[in-house]
Amino acid sequence: MPLRGRLALLAATTVALAVAACALACWFLVRAQLLGSLDDSLRDTSVSPGTVVDRVQSGQCTPPDRPAPNPFGATVQVVDTSGSSCVIVGRKLDVTDADVRVAERGRRESLHTARATNGTEYRVRTTPVAGTNLAVSVARPMAEIDESLRNLALILSLVGGAGVLGAAGAGVALARAGLRPVDRLTEAVEHIARTEDLAVRIPTDGHDEIARLSRSFNAMTEALASSRELQQQLIADAGHELRTPLTSLRTNIDLLVRSEETGRALPEEDRRELLTSVQAQMAELADLIGDLQELSRPQAAPEAEGSVQEPGAPARTEVVGLHEIAQRAVERVRPRGPRLTLTTDLAPWYVRAEPAALERSVVNLLDNAIKFSPEGGTVHTRLRDGVLTVRDQGPGVPADELPHVFDRFWRSPSARSLPGSGLGLSIVARTVRQSGGEVRLQQPADGGPGTEAVLRLPGAPTPPPTGAPG
């Protein structure tokens, strides 16, 4: 059943139950009122004790097997202490224990419903006859109120049925109006699934749940569109970056192949330069592919105790010494700057991170500093209170370029002639964010030459106790 039908059925069922409860309550209340009125009428009807005694003594009290004349539809019956009865007016009624108790003077009166010999129900009031051991029962047929109750039940059924039908119709109308925003959302989702057009937006009015759902859907499509745009930009940038070393590599290899095919040997110095260029371009390609793999790797997720590392899964985080990682990174890059001075001032600081990724990030910062440092310059690495700074003595980064240094494939105009893919600082920013820290490039606070990279990670100067939770 569609949602509209279920809502209409729910509304109709709810109204039907409410109408049924109200109708039953109304019917029983009216019945009690009518029964009370009938009881009051019986109390107002009295038979004098002398009349009862005279009728019994004169033999005018009809035996139970013969009906007495009943011109007004009422019944008057005499009951004795043994439970025997005779009828003065009307038909014989069933004698109850309450009637006998009244004859025995155990009760002052009795009000109850009894059935006559012809099956008709009567409302009976029994009172004692003064000066005798008899009681007289005055009864009136229940038909006086049954007809009214039947008419009331018919009216309530008709009104209730009309109410249920009206509720079903109103439920359909309300469901159609209430689900109209959902229909718009459904149409938008179907349109996106059919055309992959992520520019679709749903109008949002109000602050109800549907409006919140629409805003969430718009935010989702906007995020998907942004992700697709970034993906396309990444592919385009990666293709552009790969094209340059591949073109140069192909040109150099073509020269070497042509030399072999024609038998015209290249001068040894030219051949050595070509091979050196090929090696450098292959190394550049390897670095670029490694950087792309690093950026495409999923972010680290919290690991469960006892879980097994699967191939391709994010590396696990652990508590490591940032000072130790920084020292290893400095030793790794030292051969890359043989004419530079690399100094360190590292205080202990322990963080939770992926050791390999964090070391690669520090290496990237140091590589960047070495690349732009002048010959004979100094690269200083300092760690204090979780703040790692790497400072070089190069030309520095213009202030208008600082906001872009961590973008993928972005390279400063002055650095485009230097080797590199423009992904190193992007990898640094990604790794630091995963570890809950922050990184930035800035001009030195003392106003000196160069650029200062500042990496901040949460942690502590001492490692956690063995076996302590992460």
Image (cartoon, helix red, strand yellow):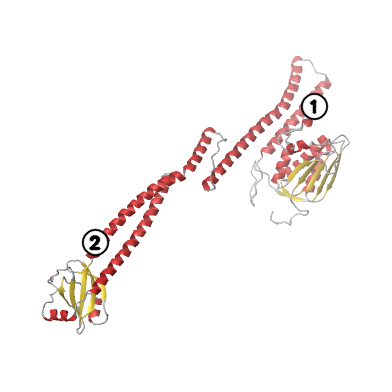
Picture residue at 69% right of the left edge, 45% below the top: 434
Q: Is residue 14 left or right of residue 441?
A: left
Q: Can residue 3 be seen from the camera position used here? A: no
Q: Is residue 201 above or below residue 166?
A: above
In the rendered image, the residue lying farthest to the bottom is 131
Image coordinates of residue 275 in percent, x first then y, are 78, 25
Residue type marked 2:
Glu
Q: Is residue 421 left or right of residue 181?
A: right
Name the residue that disc number 2 marks. Answer: 147
Nearest the viewer among 292 and 170 is: 170
Which picture quadrant has residue 53? bottom left
Picture residue at 64% right of the left edge, 44% below the top: 310
Q: Can residue 194 be seen from the camera position used here? A: yes
Q: Which tag, 2 or 1, sits closer to the chain's start?
A: 2
Q: Is residue 108 above or below residue 230?
A: below
Image coordinates of residue 272 in percent, x first then y, are 81, 24
Mark 2 or 1: the one toward you = 2
| Element marked by disc 1 | helix
Residue type marked 1:
Thr
Nearest the viewer among 106 and 36 is: 36
| Element marked by disc 2 | helix
Q: Cα distance, mark 2 to mark 1?
A: 115 Å
Image coordinates of residue 178 in percent, x first then y, are 46, 45
Quick one: quadrant of the N terminus? Answer: top left
Name the residue that disc number 1 marks. Answer: 276
Image coordinates of residue 442 in percent, x first then y, are 79, 41
As drawn, the label of residue 353 is: none
